Image: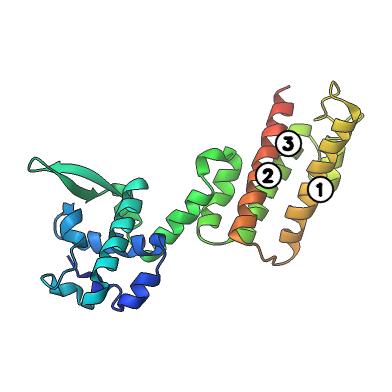
Amino acid sequence: MKPLSDFVSDANVLLTLEVTELAGIVLEQLCSAERNMLHLYSFTETSPRNPPNKFPQHHLEEISDRLAEAWAWLIAHGLIAPRRYDGKDGWVFVTRLGRRVATTQGLIDYRKAQDLPRERLHPSIADRCHGHFIRGLYDTAVFEAYKALEVAIREASIMPASLIGVHLARKAFAPQDGLLTDLESESGERQALCDLMAGALGSYKNPHSHRNVAVSPEEAVEMIVLASHLLRIVDSRKRS
């Protein structure tokens, strides 16, 4: 296995890394081992008897603690898994998922995907935008999510292709006679849902279809989750 110092040579830099950042480096290092069996103690041992690490003596104990933290994070996220070996505990192997994401960029993409779990999204939105999101194309992911919502509203309400965006939502969810309106609900609620559907498309789809819009990962998650929720409402109205 390559020494840790091949991946990060400066002890001071290593000690400034967040646990998730160091975990990516550790995972890449673990995958460089010839055997897919590793032991926590031998891995975190950074004493002078373990010269390949090449870190100053006064940093060794703290580095060992940081490596143990990264090791625990990798286990918690299923990237390495425990296994008994020769009747003893403390051994692990790199999982199939771990090998798929075993680069610094791969782990960044993996962490992004955890911020937006695919299985919690409406399937139409997951198919359209999840890949864009994990590649960091947040504005595209948001646009695709609301495009999926718009298409679903049009199909469920049997509206012409010429009716788009805000006008489409207001027609489909018109409080008095919209085909997707629940006429058994209170009139104020019908109006509120109409406004919500129209406002969501007007605020989150239209700007992204006309110009580049800066979107942070956190904002993108919130916008996409809202689109997924609204699309489930459309599905329920279509069934009813």
Label 3 residue SS: helix
Residue 36 makes an appearance in the image: no
Please tell me how crowded label 3 is: few (under 14), some (14-19), or many (20+) other residues with Cα within 10 Å: few
Rendered residue at 36%/56% (across/down): 101
Q: Is residue 16 above or below residue 225?
A: below
Foreground mark, 2 or 3, reads: 2
Above or below, comparing residue 222 to residue 27 in the picture: above
Q: Which mark is residue 227?
A: 2
Q: Secondary structure at mark 1?
A: helix
Q: Amino acid at mark 3?
A: Glu
Which residue is painted at 83% across and 47% down in the image? Answer: 166
- Which residue sits furthest left? 86
The circle on residue 199 is: 1
Residue in the foreground of this view, choosing between 9 and 212 = 9
Q: Please, what is the three-letter code of the amino acid marked with disc 1? A: Gly
If you read the primary sequence from the N terminus, does the residue marked by circle 2 or circle 1 appear first? 1
Q: Nearer the viewer, residue 71 or 182?
A: 71
Q: Which residue is mark 3?
A: 155
Q: Is residue 21 above or below residue 228?
A: below
* Along the line of sight, the residue nearer the viewer: 15 or 143: 15
